[in-house]
Structure formats: C-alpha cells, structure tokens
Image (cartoon, rainbow, N blue to C red):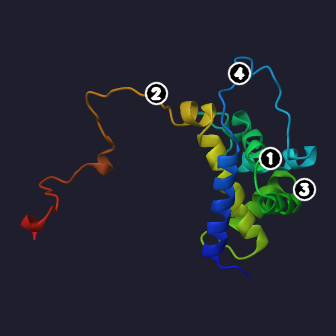
Amino acid sequence: MATRRLFLATAAAWWSQALQEAHQHTAPANAAQTPYLFRYFQPQQVTTLRSIAAVLIPADERSGGAAAARVEEYIDFILSHGATSLKDAWRKGLASYNGKSGAAIESMLRESSKAEFDPKSDSEQFFVLVKGAVVEAFYTSEEGINKELSYQGMKFLMNFEGCTHASHAIPEGYKPLVGKESA
C-alpha cells in the first residue's frame, strides 16, 4: 500500500502531465452550439461523474454548480490526454459509483471524505482525485469564475476595502510585529 504522500504526489503528477499534454486552444465562436464529443468517458461514466460533481458543487443562488459548468467535459478532455494509469484510476473509481442514486452517492462521498487528508483505501484515494478535478474544472470555467466568484476581470482598483465584516476588523491599538523593533 502506497503512502498518502506518494499517492498525492503521483495523482498531482498524473494531472499535471495530462494538463500539459492537453493543448489549450481558444474555443470557437460557435462552441456553445456544438455538443462536446467525449473522447475518454463512456456514457454511463459521464452520467456517474455528473452525479458525483453535482453533489460536490451543487447549484445555488450564485451559480448553476458543476452541472452548469459541464465539468465532466473538462475532465474528459484532460483524461483523454492523460497517462494510462490515471485513466485506470478514474475507470475503477467511477465503477464503484455506477448505478447509484444521488443519496447513495452523497453517502459514499461523505464516507470517503473522512480520510481526505490521509487516504488509504481506493475509495478514499478516488475521492481526493475526483474532488480535485471537479473543483479545478468548476473554478476555471466561466460558471465558476464569473458567477460563483464574481470575477470582474483585470481592473485597476484605486482603493481596496478589504474585508468589511465587523468580526474581521483590526483590533483598536493593534501594532503588527515587524522586525526586531517589536521584540
């Protein structure tokens, strides 16, 4: 059984390699009208991944969540350029969720997430892998960046308010400890 550190390093290397091998291009103007053709995932795997992603990043008042971001397309594109070992990990991980309902998937994810920072079993290791991929896919999508994070683009700010919550205010009389003068 591999150590957690080795697993995380391997998973990061797989994903990094797949990202490097996937040539990034600007989407054509008619991209919204052209349906994505899955290169790696089979239809049942797409359905399963969509269900998992919807549990991890559900729709809310800010955005349509992972479903609206179509994270399964991004993950498929990256995996189609990935190492065979990475593809095998995804195939095996998704198979354990096949045919499960939303409630069953949520229960399985909740159980696997308990060991997120020290994954040992295959299901715990797959949770780390799928969560990282779904989060990356969502927060690099238009849905995640613009709707969820309200990113406004490269704008110059004359003033930066910082956090305005009263509970995060700097205490009166606070002096930062900087250098030897504060000792």
Q: Earlier in the sequence, mark 1 or mark 2?
A: 1
For mark 3, give the secondary structure: loop
Report crowding for label 1: few under 14, some 14 to 19, many 20 or more residues within 10 A (C-alpha).
some
**Closer to viewer: mark 3 or mark 4:** 4
**What residue occupies the far left of the structure in this picture?**
181
Mark found first going from the N terminus, 4 or 2: 4
> Callout 4, which amino acid?
Pro
Q: Secondary structure at mark 4?
A: loop
Q: Position of residue 177 (x, y in %)?
A: 16, 63
The amino acid beneath tag 1 is Ser
- 107 vs 139, left or right, is right
Residue pointed to by mark 1: 80
Q: Which residue appears at 74% of the width and 82% of the height?
A: 1
Specify the quadrant of the image occupied by residue 175. bottom left
Q: Residue furthest top?
A: 29
Q: Secondary structure at mark 1?
A: helix
**Spot occupied by residue 50 in the image (x, y as percentages of width and height):** 80, 44
